[in-house]
Image (cartoon, helix red, strand yellow):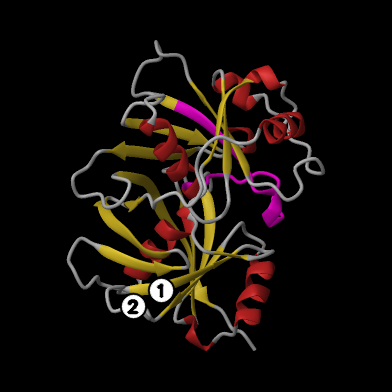
Amino acid sequence: MRFSQVDVFSHVPFRGNPLAVVHDAGGLSESEMAAIARWTNLSETAFLLEPTSAEADYRVRIFTPETELPFAGHPTLGACAAWHSAGGRPRVAGRVVQECGIGPVIVRDEGGGDWSFAAPELIRSGPLEEPEVERLASGLGLRREDVVDHSWVDNGPGSCALLLRDAEAVLAVKPDVQALDGDRVGVVGRYPTDREGPVEVEVRFFPVSAGILEDPVTGSFHAGLAVWLTGNGTLPRRYTARQGTVLGREGRVGIAAGGDDAPGTGIWVTGHVAHLVAGEIRAG
């Protein structure tokens, strides 16, 4: 089978979030997919399949080394770019429909290697229970007063978010893997408003329940954050998020809310995809 490895959410090679993509994976069993994902040892591996929905252009199954996810952001952009690079063409020009565990997700080609997906609706939102906030803050090395706001931002994987006072506080977080066992929690903080250029925030995400302490760049989490923080006016309708800084990455995620052509939440999540590895994979 054709095999690709792409770098998502960075214009700098090897500074984004890598994704393994196995093409034409219809002959693989679920256990074989899980074994390959454990072997690649990346945060996610995507398997491209024929769609089961008449409206979809392709179907993707997304596996971490530990489990399968119904939706994830960097696999959505990376899988679509890999599918397109392998000759895939959408049924409707300029509008790719990806079928995944949460249903159809719309993806569009922004040109120059940039791709966007339409942020899906949240399946769980609203504030966390206070004991949960205190527990998560402690597990992240924070005091309760460091948390300005909090919410579920779950669009499939089961994530929640804590808003901190600023980007510096985000960079200073020191997670405790044992205290956060079973959690998918992220933090976000804004850079100073007098900073030159577009509004920027710093983001970190800890998908400990998936067997990963910290993810380099997390598209699904950014999508959920944007629904929450643009919806309540905390962040403007267009901003740029940084992620992966403490890991030596240069992840950049563009958020644009309010586009007339964006279905559902009305939010587009944009990132660059670079094709870095191409070859074949043999399963048995």
172 up-or-down from 74: above or below: above
Read off the residue under disc 1: 59
Q: Residue 53 carries which label?
A: 2
Q: Is residue 42 left or right of residue 50?
A: right
In the image, residue 104 lies in the stretch drawn in magenta: no
Horizontally, is 4 left or right of 230 in the view? right
Which of the 4 quarters of the picture holds residue 205?
Answer: top right
Residue plotted at (70% across, 36% down): 132
What residue range appears in magenta? 201-219
97 shown above or below 176 = below
Q: Position of residue 111 (x, y in %)?
A: 25, 51
Q: Which residue is drawn at 64% across and 66% down?
A: 40
Residue ranking furthest to the right: 178
Q: Position of residue 169 (x, y in %)?
A: 62, 21
What x and y, as percent, mark residue 171? 62, 26
State left or right for residue 162 relative to residue 71. right
Amino acid found under the numbered disc labelled 1: Arg
Q: Can residue 85 be seen in this view?
A: no
Closer to the N terminus: mark 1 or mark 2? 2
